[in-house]
Image: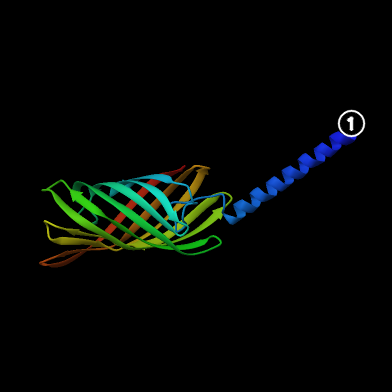
């Protein structure tokens, strides 16, 4: 009886050691984690909802991987400030669109992606106007650690908007930096700071200014 008990105990111990080893291996390879803000793509079959609040807008989106190297994110933003620094003008509007993110390169904790934000912007103050957003290129680099899982992110984007009635174009050129942290298995927190030159192009000429923004958000995986 004692020998049978010892044998069962040895089997349980061996299984536990093997399980712990496989889990550690998966964590070191990043297979058990996920990110939404960096250059990596979500695991196949998973989706993630994100909400970001700050300056100059509140953003909502759903990350959907469609291929191993491609992710799409339908989004809605509630816009309440303009891009400019010297002439912050209160406004109210929405932007509906989709973000495309393609993973160009990934090796260990390093990843690089290229994407674009395409959509329709609407402004309700000072007379209704609409714009076509050609948000590209959007370049991202991210580096992550796995225990705990946290990533630092840097990039560049140009969310260009061409306004129909005003016959002008907003051309911000924004450098950005941020982080994303996995708090619990299905919940991440993240923050992002962006800044850079801004150009308003009109029929009368081009006008230069600066732009700055900051957002804090959460992402939920299911």
Is residue 211 among what the camera can see?
Answer: yes
Most foreground residue, 193 or 41:
41
Q: Position of residue 112 (x, y in %)?
A: 45, 63
Q: Position of residue 2 (x, y in %)?
A: 89, 33
Residue at 17 percent of width and 52 percent of height: 130
When asked about the image quadrant of residue 58, the answer is top left
Q: Quadrant of the N terminus?
A: top right
Q: Is residue 59 left or right of residue 206?
A: right
Residue 180 lies, in percent from the top left, at 46, 50
Q: In percent of the image, x 40 and y 49: which residue is there?
A: 63
Label 1 belongs to which residue?
1
Answer with left or right where residue 4 lies relative to residue 80.
right
Is 56 on the left or on the right of 43, as rendered?
Answer: left
Q: Is residue 37 visible?
A: no
Q: Is residue 132 above or below residue 7?
A: below
- Please say if 172 is above or below 57: below
**Which residue shows up at 24% across the image and 55% down it?**
83
């Amino acid at each position: 009886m004692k020998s049978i008990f010892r044998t069962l105990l040895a089997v349980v111990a061996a299984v536990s050691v093997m399980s712990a080893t496989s889990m550690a291996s998966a964590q070191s390879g990043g297979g058990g984690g996920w990110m939404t803000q960096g250059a990596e793509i979500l695991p196949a079959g998973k989706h993630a909802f994100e909400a970001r609040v700050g300056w100059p807008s509140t953003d909502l989106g759903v990350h959907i991987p469609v291929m191993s190297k491609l992710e799409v994110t339908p989004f809605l933003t509630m816009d309440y400030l303009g891009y400019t620094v010297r002439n912050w003008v209160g406004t109210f509007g929405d932007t509906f669109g989709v973000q495309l993110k393609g993973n160009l390169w990934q090796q260990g904790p390093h990843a690089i992606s290229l994407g674009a934000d395409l959509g329709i912007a609407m402004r309700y103050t000072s007379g209704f106007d609409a714009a076509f957003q050609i948000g590209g290129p959007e370049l991202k680099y991210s580096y992550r650690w796995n225990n705990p899982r946290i990533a630092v992110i840097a990039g560049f984007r140009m969310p260009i908007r061409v306004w129909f009635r005003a016959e002008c174009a907003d051309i911000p050129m924004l450098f950005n930096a941020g982080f994303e942290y996995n708090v619990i298995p299905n919940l991440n927190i993240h923050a992002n700071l962006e800044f850079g030159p801004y150009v308003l192009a009109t029929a009368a000429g081009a006008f230069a200014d600066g732009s700055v923004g900051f957002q804090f958000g959460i992402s939920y995986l299911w």
